[in-house]
Image (cartoon, rainbow, N blue to C red):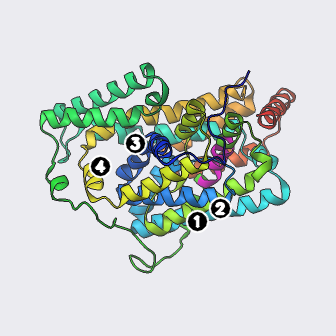
Amino acid sequence: MSKKIVLDVNEKPSLGKGLSLSLQHLFAMFGATVLVPFLTELSPAVALVSSGLGTLAFLLITRGMVPAYLGSSFAFIAPIIAAKAAGGVGAAMMGSFLAGLVYGIVALIISVAGYKWLMRLLPAVVVGPVIIVIGLGLASVAVDMAMYNPAGDYSVLHFSAALVTLAITIISSIFLKGVFGLIPILIGIASGYIYSLAIGIVDFSKVIEAKWIQVPDFTIPFVSYTPSVSWEIILLMVPVAVVTLSEHIGHQLVLGEVINRDLVKKPGLHKSILGDGVATMIASFLGGPPNTTYGENIGVLAITRVYSIYVIGGAAVIAVIFGFIGKVSALISSVPTAVMGGVSILLFGIIASSGLRMMIDAKVDLGDKRNLIISSVILVIGIGGAILKFSDKFEIHGMALAALLGILLNVILPVSDNNKSTQSEEKKEHTVA
């Protein structure tokens, strides 16, 4: 017997109840959404605003049928850092815009040809190892953040803050139940912050000096920078966008199962993918990281059985308001890097492990030479940081090169009879889900 729905997708809660439910969704996405700009040196306030506006746009494009919240995407952390190093914040934002454009193009193709072709192009044997590369490729970033003080020197004090944060995040994730079990990142960061205050490694002066109402530091095209497109930026960002499409499809299938609706058919994957793309474009116009649907918020839906788009929309509006509260932005910025490093150790490991889980769930047979070759090439090329350089401004490297090679190998290598049956089962699972 299925559990009773408290509020269905288009049902509206009372103001008080709606506010409390919206805050649950805000807390569920908050830790991860502000962590991405922290790691990429973008504005957390802008990330909150673009997250909220992107979610509202998504709800409109999907005609109020898909109760999903969109927050900062971890898949783009390394590409954003590389794009900023190559051409500044403007280059990273143009890359984000192109990633959103890719979503729009794929949505158009899906509206005409369906989505099965995308699953054939991006099976688990390709996407799983690429996700592992995304997680492990950031491992050294997390460890460095945890171990070193702002001056770049090894610090036992800072490392202790990272370890306390990590420990409390793990404990929260394992032992807390219900909605609290969905916000271990936020609990870990808050606990690490309190510990950091106690040991004296927090500069709280900027929080005291900050205004209550403050316009975020938006990075707007033609105002903050002159937009330009280069092959380097295209090759850094676009391959990642192609891979994250499979993550989007997975989220829609799971969400459809939670709310007992076939979202693949109505409103259709082309609508949700377009909404995701538009949300990322909005972020790029404001100076925020690319957006993606959040599994944490799907978890909140499953626990509360409140599927109302008005609750999701309320969370989005609150996120935008938070972005304009100067003291909130200053408080986030005052969190020690070591604390963020502690939570990143777990998060990046989970990202890598989720790639492995994807391969296990899809029953990828690594005893099959074809699968073994594809996954091996992706892992070594991606983690090793290989570079294919054609000129000073035209090169493919790291995760992007690994993803492209994986897709190419999947297309050209012959499929064994055993592998054909596995792929058939994988397709069936996607269809059933």
* Amino acid type, label 4: Ile
Camera sees residue 331: yes
Picture disc at residue 424: none
**Quadrant assignment, res 209:** bottom left
Residue 96 position, x and y percent, is: 53, 62
Q: Is residue 191 above or below residue 403?
A: above
Going 81% across and 46% down the picture, which residue do you hit? 116
Distance from the alpha carbon under mark 3 to that under mark 2? 27 Å
Q: Is residue 199 magenta?
A: no
Q: Earlier in the sequence, mark 4 or mark 3?
A: 3
Where's the N terminus, which quadrant? top right
Q: Earlier in the sequence, mark 4 or mark 1?
A: 1
State the residue lying farthest toward the right.
417
Q: Are marks 3 and 2 in contact (CB under 8 Å)?
A: no
Q: Is residue 132 visible?
A: no
The quadrant of the picture occupied by the C terminus is top right
C-alpha gap between disc 4 and disc 1: 29 Å
Alpha-carbon neighbours of circle 1 within 10 Å: few (<14), some, or many (≥20)? many
Residue stretch in magenta: 241-250
The numbered dot on residue 102 is 2
Q: Nearer the viewer's eye, disc 3 or disc 2?
A: 3
> In which quarter of the view is residue 276 placed?
bottom right
Q: Nearer the viewer, mark 4 or mark 1?
A: 4
- Residue bearing the label numbered 4: 332
Q: CB atoms at circles 1 and 3 under 8 Å apart?
A: no
Task: Give the structural element (helix, strand or loop) at label 3.
Answer: helix
Q: How many marks?
A: 4
